[in-house]
Amino acid sequence: MNMDGKANTSAFNRVGTMLVFLQGQDQRGLHGSIVNGFLKESVAFHGIDDLILSLDEICDWINCPRRVSEPRFLNRQMKKSFEESPVQKPEINNENRLLGMDLESYIQTFRAKDVLMITIEYRQNASLQGSVCGKITGEQRVSFRSALELMRLFSQISLTEPEDGQEE
């Protein structure tokens, strides 16, 4: 609590902040890794769908922001399979380092074609709400209201090199 009696939310807001290192793009889509200060290692992704699901999983692992509703399944067998499937969950970082950046994460920043900061503020209506910021956004925060909207934003990113003589 601060002197006004209000809770200090700066650490809380940082929990849902993730750095997305875009390493490249191929026929399967964008690929790279996600770093969160509360995980000891980065989480790799390949494709926009894998990125979105990984962001949601990370929120589950660090328990912030909490989901408002439980996930739905097409049938009981799929639910059972999901609940019983072993999840390779990274170790939680109790040291609370600034953005959890270790040497490997710094190396990733140099290899990345772009780095985006995604802040997940809420997980309501079985989706994600938050903002994204980076060089691609002109350093402006761009809000998204759902995972579908975030997917649409990422689908417009192209990391391919322009051909000689052509501008981006």
Image: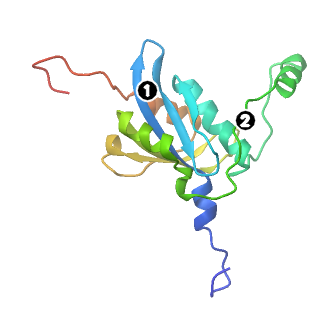
Location of residue 15 by image quarter: bottom right
Residue at x 90%, y 20% (from the top left corner): 76
Label 2 environment density (alpha carbons within 10 Å; few <14, some 14–19, many ≥20)? few
Tag on residue 74? none
Instruction: Name the residue at the bottom extreme.
Output: 3
User: Can you give x and y, in whole percent of width and height, for residue 127 in the image?
Assistant: 65, 39
- Of 124 and 166, which appears nearest the observer? 166
Question: In the image, is 47 to the left or to the right of 53?
Answer: left
Location of residue 23 by image quarter: top left
Instruction: Name the residue at the left extreme.
Output: 165
Structure colour scheme: rainbow
In the rendered image, which residue does mark 2 sit on?
89
User: Can you give x and y, in whole percent of width and height, for residue 29 in the image?
Assistant: 46, 19
Identify whether 33 is placed above or below 17. Answer: above
- Of 33 and 134, which appears nearest the observer? 33
Marks 1 and 2, the one that precedes in the sequence: 2
Contact? badges 1 and 2 (CB < 8 Å): no
- Of 119 and 45, which appears nearest the observer? 45
In the structure shown, which secondary structural element does the residue marked by tag 2 occupy?
Answer: loop
In the rendered image, which residue does mark 1 sit on?
155
Residue at x 37%, y 46% (from the top left corner): 134
- Of 86 and 72, which appears nearest the observer? 86
Instruction: Name the residue at the top extreme.
Output: 27
Question: In the image, is 2 to the left or to the right of 87?
Answer: left
User: Can you give x and y, in whole percent of width and height, for residue 100 in the image?
Assistant: 56, 51
| Count of all numbered marks drawn on residues in the image | 2
Residue at x 63%, y 87% (from the top left corner): 3
Question: What type is the residue that disc 1 sits on?
Answer: Ser
